[in-house]
Image (cartoon, rainbow, N blue to C red):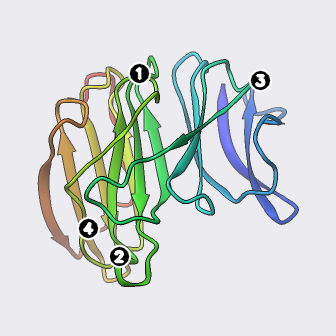
Amino acid sequence: KLYSIGASGSSMLPYHSENGGVTWVRYSALPDNKQYNCIAANLSGQYVAVGSWTESQTIYISSDYGATFNTISLPTGSFYAGFVPWNIDMSEDGSVIAVLVKATQTTQVGQFTVCTSTNYGASFSTSSSFISTNASEGSVSVSGNGVYIRWYAWNTSNNSWGYNSSNSGSSWSYNGLSTNQLFKDVSMSYNGQ
């Protein structure tokens, strides 16, 4: 199975393919007037998570292969209200979901943190560890077994920041600032080692 965000008229919509990308089908259960920007699915495709940068503190999760989607509200926690989903990943079984989010308020633009769920998206918690600088992009990855989560944010001045968790997002360790190094994407193996 393949999953992608693609342009359709003036919208960016989520699609999936069941034949190696020969044909693509839109998830018709989702509203088609949104600007979706991130999508993730578990190994079997039963669980699908989709985010839109036009939907504040909201993602959509399906537990039936995309036939229906539930609207999930992401908690503010100690982060700023008004953030939007920026990148999503999940574990192989779909139980652990990580949503990288970006602040949108004028005074906090470019600040990132992550929201995590360990119950298939039924509830989320928002990390109190966040990048408090002007980053422009970010990426998150969850190991296949759901134990390890790593996320990065970076800016146009060639700086990168990162955080790691080895307990499904319960706590985080700061990787520090990498100058003149852009960690633009991240991916992990099943065991995250």
Left or right of 176 in this view: 189:
right
Q: Residue furthest right?
A: 9
Residue type at mark 3: give it: Asn
Could you tell me if the residues under marks 3 and 2 are in contact, i.e. CB atoms within 8 Å? no
| Number of residues whose C-alpha sits closer than 10 Å to that of mark 2, classed few (under 14), some (14–19) or many (20 or more) | some
- The residue at 73%/57% (across/down) is 34
Q: Which numbered tag is attached to residue 95? A: 1
Mark 4 or mark 1, whichever is nearer to me: 1
Q: Is residue 163 above or below residue 119?
A: below
| Alpha carbon separation for disc pair 4 and 1 | 29 Å
Which of the numbered marks, if any, corresponds to residue 19? 3
* Mark nearer the N terminus (3 vs 1): 3
Q: Determine the CA span between mark 3 and mark 1.
A: 25 Å
Determine the CA span between mark 4 and mark 2: 7 Å
> Distance between the Cα atoms at labels 3 and 2?
37 Å
Horizontal and vertical percent position of residue 168: 25, 31
**Spatial separation of the CA atoms under disc 3 and disc 4:** 37 Å
* Viewer-side label of 3, 2: 2
